[in-house]
Image (tube, coloured by chain):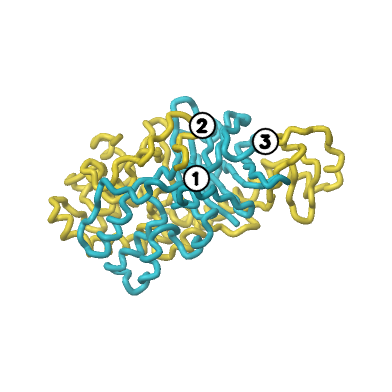
Amino acid sequence: MHKSMRFAGAVGIGLLASTIGIGVVTAADHVEAPGTQGNPAADITDFYAWHKDDGKIVAVIAFAGLTEVGQPATYDDSVLYGIHIDNNGDNAADENVWIRFGKNGAGEWGVKVDGLAADPVIGPVGTTIDGPLGLRVYAGLRDDPFFFDLQGYLATLDTAKLSFDSTRDSFAKTNVTAIIVEISTDAAAGGSDSLAMWASTYQ
Amino acid sequence: MLTTTKTWTTLFLAGAFALTACNGDDTGDTDDTATATATMTSPTTTDPTTTSSSTDPTTTTTTDPTTTDPTTTDPTTTDPTTGETETTGADPYVFDETPADQLSKVDRMGMPAINTAVITSKDDYNAASPADDAAGDFVPEIVANIDGFHMALDGELMGAGLTPCPTMECVEVAAPFVVPDTLKLDLAGDAGFPNGRKLADPVMDVTLALVLLDIKNGSHDPGTLAGLPLNPPANDKEFLADFPYLADPH
């Protein structure tokens, strides 16, 4: 679910009316927390991770949600992105993949990916980059992969009436900036069959 | 797209055991330390350019200046005052090198919907870690928010022919997936939410079912709302079969 949806804010009709309030509800479009408002490059909208039968795990960090058609991707060289993997069940990261954006003298954006004991992979945004140990990277503007009737959801919480419409996707025809990495399952898993993964941003 | 009811039941039974383990876990402080250590050490141990700049900046001037491939990682210049490192080449990209432990955490996400849906102290949650989750730091507000949903919507759900869950039963079913806030991958099983999260998975309808409906006693399964469907069942653009999987922008 998009963290932009302010589920708890809208639940003000329930227990939280006095503590969450109108401001949060009306901001039900983009960021999930005060600290990410106005900071789209650091505001993760969705995180995906799945394993494939070719020995790879795909991880996706989407951010800068609800980018309108025609608007560019969002890159910020002050934001550090992390994809974290716990492969021994202690809720701490055993492997990290770190991603940064940076510009060259011509003002073109590049992306750098560190982690999984491989040398950093560096290349331009908007193109697939192949690195060592099966690492594959793409960063750039993409269709927002998330689909949900946010309008109906908010109406449901506002009115306490089920108001969903399965033909209404509030995130249709909007874009995100996304980092997509494909990593070696062996390198990530450390021999384990049970992984926990999450994403974070630092600035 | 949806896992069978039998598989769901197996997953949730397994989850119930995990929840019990979570509640009995009082090792949050140790996990915090482990997280901080991993965060702090990984960027430097995996980035030789950082090491060279912090230990002996003068050695960077000896790097072969004839290399022109912008994708190489050999440094030609390193500014030890800023920590920024240029790669070689005619017009190299410049990246900030500040490691995570010298920055502030802005956001984090594992499972879909958690901060948005069931967390009240949103900034604190983003600044926290899965170890904090597992220590139970946010369980009271998760329970309070799920309770809020039921106060508002149980009558409507019953009117629609659905059976809502008592709040604590929903918490019992959902908590193993929600706490800690990570995507769990069982590499021995087929991928698909909640075994990881694929692009096309109907995660919102599944999440709403976990939070709202009686699954513990078998009235529904996590796929009930997706089967209606309650929300759009698919993305507006078709996903790509191959890397990078996400559709081209509009």
Q: Secondary structure at mark 1?
A: strand
Q: Residues within 10 Å of mark 1 (few under 14, many from 20)?
A: many
Identify which residue, A105 or B173, lies in the foreground.
A105
Query: Sequence order check: which comes first, mark 3 or mark 1?
Result: 1
* B97 over B72 or under it: above or below: below
Of the residues tagged 1 and 2, which is closer to the observer? 1
- Res. A157 visible in picture: yes
Q: CA distance from mark 1 to mark 2?
A: 18 Å
**Residue underneath mark 1:** A61
Is label 3 or label 1 in front?
A: 1
Dot 2 corresponds to which residue?
A185
How far across and down, in percent of the image, does residue A9 sit? Answer: 36, 65
Q: Is residue B235 left or right of residue A46?
A: left
- Disc 2 residue type? Thr
**Amino acid type at image mark 1:** Ile
Which quadrant of the structure image shows residue B81?
A: bottom right
Residue at figure coordinates x 64%, y 34% from the top left: A118
Q: Residues within 10 Å of mark 3 (few under 14, many from 20)?
A: some
* Image quadrant where one finds the C terminus of chain A: bottom right
Residue position marked by numbered label 3 in the rendering: A119
- The hue in which chain A appears in the rendered picture of the protein: cyan
Chain for disc number 2? A
Residue A136 vs A169, above or below: the answer is: above
Does residue B195 appear in this view?
Answer: no
